[in-house]
Amino acid sequence: MSGVRLSGSIRRRLTLQLVGSAAVLAALLFVIVQTFTRDLAEETHDRILLASATSIMDAVSVRSGEVTVDLPYAALSMLSNVSDDRVFYRVVLGRDTLTGYPDLPMPDPQPGDDEPLFQTLDYKGESVRMATAVRRLSLNGVPTHLAISVAQTRTGQVERLDALSRTALMLGAGFFAVAVLLAVWAAQSSIRPLRDLAGMVARRGPKDLRPVARPVPAEMAPLVSSLNSFIDRLRLSLSRSEDFIAEAAHRVRTPLATVRTQAENTLHRIERPENRAALREMIRAIDESSRAAGQLLDHAMVSFRVDSLERSPVDLTELMHELVDRLRPVADLKDITLVLEATAPHPILGDPILVQNAGRNLLDNAIKYAPDESLVRVALNTEGGMQTVAICDQAGGFPTDQLDQLTERFVRGRNAEGTVGSGLGLTIAREVAEAHGGRLEIRNTQDGAGACVTLVFPSA
């Protein structure tokens, strides 16, 4: 994720939003359940109080113009079954108390008001809930009203309401806990398509520039469409770059080779020493330009193919045989003997063009720097699961204080002055070896008479 600017987490943001919504819903659930259970509990209590008052009302009788009350046992016992709270009652005819607690406050019934009345009040230092039932009577032709009030302290009711509140709280907490788990699961599920898409793109090889064709949610369609458009542009750009490198190599090398040939032909026809020296300098400059341009294009090609490496079986023995045969005429011009020490196959998995390019640069360097009538040895070996290609010359070796720098671009040894070169051959070989999971080793021979450069590749 190098270079990526982060602005938070979608999963965390979505989870927090869902958890926040769950918290609000849990609070609403608690309030609704608590309110409903409180109303239901109070309504149930009121009905019991009213049933007790009605039971007493049914026990009232009028005989010979007198009102008598035969207080039934069940009228008050039904309240004691509900809780252990104290019970109070009062029976009033008109303004006279017939029985009960005379100081129990009672509402003043209005004429024609036969509906039961409920109220909460303080009595004897305690909060009580009271129900009042009213009936109109006619005594000796005189209309009056009979009011019966039954009250009960609210300690038990408060305890029940507190228990219901705790139940509502636990219900809300349980709902919140479940909602949090569902929120986390929903957030994970929501971003899973995005994570799957990222994983699919990350698993693709460097040459896999196919458009993304997997089904995605509608919200991700613009992202996938933009990604496919970018892949198309990248594929077109890479194709153009590859074509340009190949065309540039042809366009640069061919004219330089033609100019060099013409200069050599002219050199053979000119007799004046100063003109021949000038032509030799021209030929040398052409050689340097040709080699520099060729290696620059080779390096560009290597960089391009390394980024999109395609591996296939490569036999190093066969490949080096081909390179030695191809460069033997160049070595013969300096009477250099090329010796290839390889018998058994040495297989690796790699890009044959890159491996050949690395081997050709190393062998060409060895021939170029080796003195006339010397020996260049190419040895292939298998060491500890690795395949090695060692190319050794008799050119006097590398400066020991420059061994760690010679694989850098455009760096040449101090003893390379006067020899055509660009300082890219070892760089190309190192990049090819590292792209295949190997390495490039540089050392001088034990006697100090030459140098050995070794390509190391993992075995197939």
Image (tube, rainbow, N blue to C red):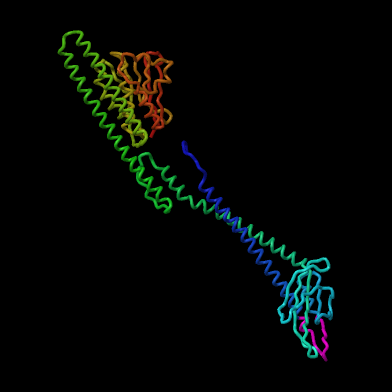
Q: Residue at x 19, y 17 (%)?
A: 263
Q: Residue at x 24, y 14 (%)?
A: 281
Q: Residue at x 42, y 50 (%)?
A: 220
Work out which residue is located at the far bottom of the displayed protein and give it: 64
Q: Position of residue 197 (x, y in %)?
A: 43, 47
* Residue 193 higher or lower than 362, as above or below: below
Q: Quadrant of residue 23?
A: bottom right
Q: In the image, is residue 58 part of the stretch drawn in magenta? A: yes
* Residue 270 higher or lower than 229, as above or below: above
Pick the front one: 307 or 24: 24
Q: Is residue 344 left or right of residue 51?
A: left
Work out which residue is located at the far left of the displayed protein and give it: 269
Query: The magenta stretch spans which residues?
Result: 55-72
Q: Is residue 119 left or right of residue 99?
A: left
Q: Position of residue 97 (x, y in %)?
A: 84, 79
* Residue 294 higher or lower than 335, as above or below: below
Q: Residue at x 22, y 26 (%)?
A: 254
In the picture, the quarter occupied by the C terminus is: top left
